[in-house]
Image (tube, grey):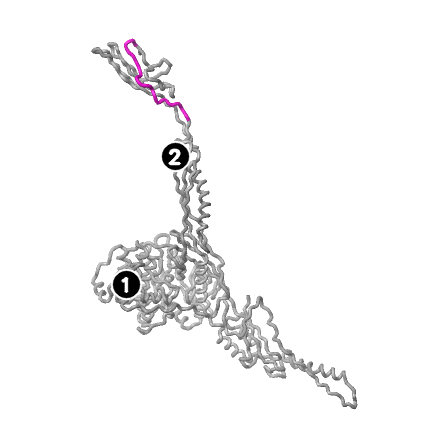
Amino acid sequence: MLSLEGKQLGNYDVIQRIRVGGMGAVYEGRQRTAFGRRVAIKVILGDYATDPDMRRRFAREARTVARLQHPHILPLIEFGDEQSILYLVMPFIDGGTLTSYLRRKLLDLSEIAAIYQQLLDAVEYAHEEGLIHRDIKSSNVLLEQRRSGPPHVYLADFGLVRTARQDGERPGKTIPLDQVPGTPHYMAPEQTRGIVTPATDIYALGVLLYQMLTGMLPYHDEDDVRVIQMHLFSPIPVPSAQDASIPRELDEVVCVAMAKRPEARYKNIAELRAAFLAAINGSALLESEETRLREPEKPPIAKRRDSQSLMFIDSQEFSVPPAPVPEPRRPRQATPIPIIVRERVKERQRVPETVRNRPRATQRITEEPVYTRRKRPVQIWLATMAVPLVLLILLLMPRVLNFSFFPSGFPLFGTPPVAMVYVTAQTKQAQSTYVLTASPAVQVPELVTHTIPDRLIQQTLTDTRVVPTTGIKTVDAVPAHGVILFTNRGNTPMIFPAQFTLTTPQGVRVQLTQNVFVPAHQNGQNGNANVDAVAVTTGTSGNIVAHALDGTCCTESVAATNPAPFTGGVDAQTLHIVAQADLDGAQAAATSALQNKIQQQMQKQLRVNEVFAGKPSYVVSLSSDNPVGAQSDQVQVTTTLSATVVAYNTLVTDHVALQLFSKQEIQLLGDSYQLEGTPTVIARQVETQGQNGLTYLNVTVRGNWLYAFSTQQVDQWRQSIKGATVAAALAFLNAQTGISAVQIRLPFGADHLPTSMDEIHVVSIINN
């Protein structure tokens, strides 16, 4: 993996990698001559960095962006070449891409309108300049956040730009589906025939509009070839089938922009903008003269409903059944390593010496003639020792004096002249963190959108308990009240003022509450008058019985009585009432107990390999048999607790992260590296939890990649080092790609490698 962190490219310090694409990477940097201004630095990756066509394309992108001056096209600051590393420098946009923005939130229509119109302005300007972007997608749309209002949009990555005058591939000449330039999920059908026109960008804008409205892509499959075939043959899905709140007028905009045939789409960005604005404003487009002129070229759109969703189907486009879907492509496999032997060593060790059969020096002893019968043991011993000593000197001379009596590769005593070359392959440790969106709206993992399924677990429990009331209410004493009847038998009328007091024989006094006039006796009839009165002393003592006041009043001619008893007298007292604290205390105790029970029951609902994505959220409701303030010595409180928690499958999560890791690292490192062993998920963390069960997870994966030597590489090495000295061979091999260390063992007695490739054996060693 290309690593530039901490390095300097021209006038810029590389800080960290931001994102990686199929052929390039973008880093955050600081511009030295602009007070450390933050910039984005784009470079070519891997083998693409040395590919002449890719370098020309990169330079062409720089020239293209340099000539474009538009507020919604990311401008170029500088183009440079540092130690064969081509790089583009652009302003740093801290709002991220539209892809990440859509993962965080579902946009409303006003925000979609603001973002989409800015993007339309940028594409229209490029078309007016005679350029076709050819790779419009959400990851190439950068957003700059503002303090208020929608973000500012920048269209980036003009690496696949074509001029409108270019014909591309000859029309009708089909490109293999796995070699079509562009991004499969946004690719117009005619691109597989090498046809690129402004209508190609309009198609991608239709796909992007569908994605902004629904939060998902119109066609999705793990196999890119299958996605391209869906663009060619599958019906066009409508946004309202995913979300009924989306206006149907926008369905029409998406379907026309994504028409299978280019001539059936909007003729230019201006038409697309007009249709979009009319739809977003809630009114259908009025048929104009220009629309009528386009109608003969544009096939009629027929609507039909299937059992899954509402789709617009171009009837002319599907008059011929689509071609059968081929088998999904298998992942590209790295070339097997054509090495004679492959060993694994725990740590770097010395390679053992080749086992050799040391020559045995035999000395034939000639006997003396019989007539002498004398042996010479000393001479025989000296002769026996001299022969191997001479041979040893001859063998050591090449090592000490750089001179040899034997030609290079001379086979001594039948030993084959084989040179052993021990090559230690490079290993690279890679680690990446992926943001996965867990959603209950999906049933299977989606690698393209980094989405995995999750589910909501819900549980409701109720607790009822009776608690004594703690509220206190003091009731004041109340006087009794009643009515007094005055009877006047005299000839003179009488007036009694308010607070006139009467006393019962038992000593209970009552007062009039108002003045009363009692008429005189006339025409044989006594004068009568009723008046309200209250007991002077409060409490129950004023509750006198009827006729307790019977008797004369003031004069002999006037009598007073109470026809009915005085009632309502109440003594002062203290009462128990329901307090809010009584309900709160009961609720708190019940909630704590219910939470423990709910968590236990939810734990039992987890499936194999599932875990909770955070803590449950609770909703508490309360009811009681007496309201706050009611007089009662006790109150019955019922607490209902509803809990919701998100659960996701760790096995599925890890599997998706590992697939993303393998796919990304293969793109970065190329086919020359193979995954060594199994990558490991070293961290899994819940970043945030959204609404409706959405959860964002950070999953970190680490793995080792081993450089795999191809047959062609090994043969080229052997051809280059045959007949060379050890020093020259080591210098050559240590400079080769993928080699971290080399050791060479020559044939016994040789000071050069053999001149035959067949006598040079290569052994690959893997260090752990």
Q: Which residue is mark 1?
A: 313
Count neighbours of disc 1 (C-alpha within 10 A) and say few if under 14, some if 14 to 19, many if 20 or more. Answer: many
Counting from the top left corner in percent of width and height, residue 322 is at: 31, 68
Q: Which residue is mark 2?
A: 628
Counting from the top left corner in percent of width and height, residue 397 is at: 65, 80
The local secondary structure at tag 1 comes to strand
Q: Mark yes or no: residue 133 visible.
A: no
- Left or right: 87 in relation to 545: right
Mark 2: amino acid: Val
Residue at 54 percent of width and 78 percent of height:
721
Count neighbours of disc 2 (C-alpha within 10 A) and say few if under 14, some if 14 to 19, many if 20 or more. Answer: some
Magenta stretch holds residue 569: yes
| Badge 2 or badge 1: first in the primary sequence | 1
User: For residue 727, which quarter of the picture?
Assistant: bottom right
Figure check: 181 above or below 535: below
- Left or right: 101 in relation to 767: left
Mark 1: amino acid: Ile
How many marks overall? 2
Counting from the top left corner in percent of width and height, residue 79 is at: 41, 67
Figure check: 493 above or below 604: above
Q: Which residues are magenta?
A: 555-573
Residue at 21 percent of width and 61 percent of height:
288
Q: Quadrant of the C terminus?
A: bottom right
Counting from the top left corner in percent of width and height, residue 260 is at: 29, 66
User: For residue 619, which quarter of the picture?
Assistant: top left
